[in-house]
Amino acid sequence: MLKSRNSYRFQKILGRISVWLGLLFFIVILLFPFYFMFISSFKPNDELYNLSKNPLMIESWTLDHYTYLLKQTRFIQWLKNSTLVAVVSTGISIVIGTIAAYSLARLRYRGVQALGMVIFISYLIPTTLLFIPLAYVVRNLGLFDKQVALMITYPTFLIPFCTWLLMGYFRGIPKELEESAMVDGATRLQALRMIILPIMIPGIVSAGLFAFTLSWNEFVYALTLAQTESIKTLPVGIVSQLVLADVYFWGELMGAALLGSVPIALLYSFFLEYYVKGMTAGAVKG
């Protein structure tokens, strides 16, 4: 009896150790890129390009890379452009995606299932196949090399994603809630605005975070449609200014990558609770 208890305790302790070791492994894997960017952005060039030095350690600190990045490039302008484009594109996509998801999840009309599948398939089409025809359309509209071109092209891949994600959340909300409101005299839009949308906040936040991240990191459309230096977004601006032929400004690149990841990290930190609720509800319901 005593032996079995000791064996059970040993297995329990071993299980906990295995869990913590697994978590530690994944934490190290996830945080290593940020650690490497951090130390590389503060290394002087003679240490950064010296192969005899330990790449994971830093011997002397310098702010030269950040000084060059902030004073010799338009990093702040690129940051503002990315923020503006991402916020506007995400807002448009959330509004249209919410209405579309509600229509597909709640209303019954001919071709609703086929329409939902078309929206899902359209999200799967890679941007490398669409940027040429989209560039042609944007040029004909007279919007080429303007920020508004990115604001209207980004929703072409954000709206299908937001729609498909929010459909699962809508299907998890009982229909009786809005039906009761409609019985009391509310219209369908009023029921959606006053009853359903407050419940949908976790799902909307989750979709918004994903949409903002996709907009923030988008490269192909921004490279094609934004040529003027003053309207370039962060990913395109960094590559155009810090990668010259076969010359890579590694210190400045690491600093730009680190600073560029800060807004996304802050967003996920502030809205983590809503993000988890929205993703789990949208994944298991419907």
Image (cartoon, helix red, strand yellow):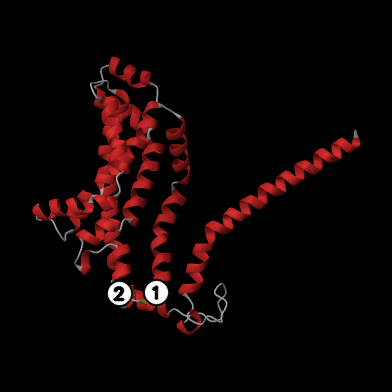
Query: Is residue 11 toward the left or the right of residue 257 in the image?
Result: right
* Residue 15 seen in the current view: yes
Query: 86 above or below 96?
Result: below
x and y percentages locating residue 254 in the rendered image:
43, 70
Q: Which mark is residue 50?
A: none
Helix, strand or loop status at disc 2: loop
CB within 8 Å, label 2 to label 1: yes
Residue wearing tag 1: 252
Q: Amino acid at mark 2?
A: Thr
Quadrant in the picture for the N terminus: top right
Which residue sits furthest bottom?
Answer: 46
Where residue 74 sits, quadrant-wise, is: bottom left
Apparent side of residue 180 relative to residue 132 in the rendered image (left or right):
right
Q: Is residue 150 above or below residue 65?
A: above
Q: Residues within 10 Å of mark 2 (few under 14, many from 20)?
A: some
- Left or right for 60, reference 171: right
Query: Which residue bears the numbered disc 2?
Result: 73
Confirm whether residue 94 shows in the render: no
Q: Is residue 248 left or right of residue 91?
A: right
- Residue 285's x, y, as percent? 44, 28
Taking 259 as reference, is 277 above or below it? Answer: above
